[in-house]
């Protein structure tokens, strides 16, 4: 009788452990999809001659419909999302150290870049990081 109870308790414990493992694996699989996309930050840096114009980063492919991520490092600037043949967003003002998540009309599969136009009209270095997809957007 004691052995029977002991074995029954082991079965119940094993079922609990297996259920916990299955739930944990499913949660990790669901969360893994949050990281699909082109979310690696890529540095940009260029010399701005103070002409009032804009500079465009290289084009990168979007893999999901999350906002474009931008973080300026050097100066205040207007930033917008551009496509190869059209603008995907309006300009947004971005200060050094500020993280921006720019919603745009660019969908999965689009190639996008960011257009940066500094607020100043003097020579300076413009730098920051950006990615076409984002993972920490709330």
Image: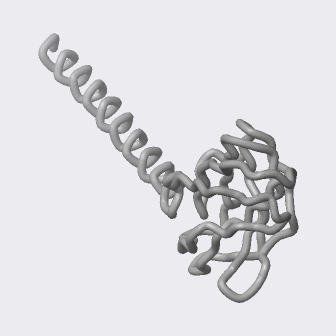
Residue 132 position (above or below residue 5): below
Q: Please name whichever residue, 73 or 22, is drawn nearer the observer in this view of the structure.
A: 73
In which quadrant will I find the N terminus?
top left
The answer to whether 71 appears left or right of 40 in the picture is right
Q: Please name whichever residue, 100 or 93, is drawn nearer the observer in this view of the structure.
A: 93
* Percent position of residue 102, x then y: 76, 58
The answer to whether 47 appears left or right of 38 in the picture is right
* Percent position of residue 109, x then y: 57, 80
The residue lying at 71 percent from left, 58 percent from top is: 48
Residue 58, by quadrant, is bottom right
Residue 26 position (above or below residue 68): above
* Percent position of residue 116, x then y: 74, 61
Q: Please name whichever residue, 120 or 92, is drawn nearer the observer in this view of the structure.
A: 120
The residue lying at 66 percent from left, 54 percent from top is: 69
The residue lying at 57 percent from left, 74 percent from top is: 59
Residue 125 position (above or below residue 58): above
Say how the picture is coloured: one colour
In which quadrant will I find the C terminus?
top right
Residue 3, by quadrant, is top left
The residue lying at 67 percent from left, 76 percent from top is: 107
Residue occupying the far left of the picture: 3
* Percent position of residue 97, x then y: 71, 36
Residue occupying the far top of the picture: 2
């Amino acid at each position: 009788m004691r052995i029977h109870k002991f074995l029954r308790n082991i079965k119940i414990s094993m079922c609990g452990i297996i259920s916990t493992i299955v739930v944990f694996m499913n949660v990790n699989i669901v969360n893994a999809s949050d990281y699909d996309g082109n979310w690696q930050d890529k540095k940009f840096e260029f010399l701005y001659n103070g002409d009032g114009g804009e500079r465009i980063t290289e084009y990168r492919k979007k893999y999901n419909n999350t906002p474009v991520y931008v973080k300026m490092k050097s100066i205040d600037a207007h930033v917008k999302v551009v496509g190869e043949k059209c603008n995907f967003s309006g300009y947004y003002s971005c200060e050094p150290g500020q993280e921006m998540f720019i919603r745009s009309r660019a969908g999965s599969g689009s190639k996008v870049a960011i257009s940066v136009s500094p607020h100043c009209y003097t020579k300076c270095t413009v730098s920051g990081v950006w990615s076409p997809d984002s993972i920490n957007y709330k």
